[in-house]
């Protein structure tokens, strides 16, 4: 298993735990009317689960299991793979911070949301570029 795959899968597992904690906080808030600062937590929960857990797990397994690109570069471009990992996680963490801070006054939170979306878009585009050549017919 390539090191990048291990990073992606381990990070995905961490996001799964964080998403489940956010889900418990959301449920507890409804059940016990907890005075938690949970504005934006529903969106954070969704992103931690779908981007952090599901998407990152898919990226990791695809990076590992898809057919090799060539004998010289089996996973095409390992540097691009690491850049995708960094962009994906930076975008997701920035999204979580911006969503939780969105209740505060100021446009900075909106700009952080836009920046996080751009980072996530580049991560997805980088994954597609790095994986596209590995998908071919027999």
Image (cartoon, grey):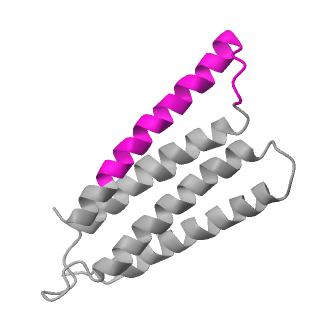
Tell which residue pokes out farthest to the right in this image.
105
Location of residue 61 with respect to 41 vertically, above or below: below
Tell me where residue 109 appears, x and y as whole percent. 76, 55
Residue 41: name its quadrant. top right
Tell which residue pokes out farthest to the top in this image.
32
Q: Which residue is drawn at 70% across and 59% down?
A: 113
Tell which residue pokes out farthest to the left in this image.
71
| The magenta segment | 9-37
Residue 32 highlighted magenta (yes or no): yes
Tell me where residue 138 appears, x and y as whole percent. 18, 81
Location of residue 100 with respect to 84 vertically, above or below: above
Tell me where residue 93 appears, x and y as whole percent. 55, 53
Closer-to-camera residue (66/117): 117
Mostly what secondary structure, the magenta segment? helix
Closer-to-camera residue (46/132): 46
Closer-to-camera residue (136/105): 105
Residue 60: name its quadrant. bottom left
Tell me where residue 74 appears, x and y as whole percent. 18, 80
Say if residue 135 shows up in the picture.
Answer: no
Location of residue 4 with respect to 48 vertically, above or below: below
Say if residue 34 shows up in the picture.
Answer: yes
Lateral position of residue 32 relative to residue 77, left or right: right
Residue 135 highlighted magenta (yes or no): no
């Amino acid at each position: 298993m390539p090191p990048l795959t291990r990073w992606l899968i381990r990070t995905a597992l961490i996001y799964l735990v964080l998403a489940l904690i956010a889900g418990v906080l959301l449920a507890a808030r409804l059940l016990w009317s907890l005075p938690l600062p949970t504005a934006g937590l529903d969106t954070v929960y969704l992103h931690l689960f779908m981007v952090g857990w599901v998407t990152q797990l898919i990226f990791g397994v695809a990076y590992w299991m898809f057919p090799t690109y060539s004998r010289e570069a089996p996973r095409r471009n390992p540097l691009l793979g690491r850049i995708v990992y960094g962009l994906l996680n930076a975008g997701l963490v920035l999204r979580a911070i911006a969503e939780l801070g969105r209740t505060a006054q100021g446009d900075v939170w909106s700009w952080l949301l836009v920046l996080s979306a751009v980072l996530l878009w580049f991560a997805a585009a980088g994954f597609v570029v790095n994986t596209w050549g590995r998908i071919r017919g027999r």
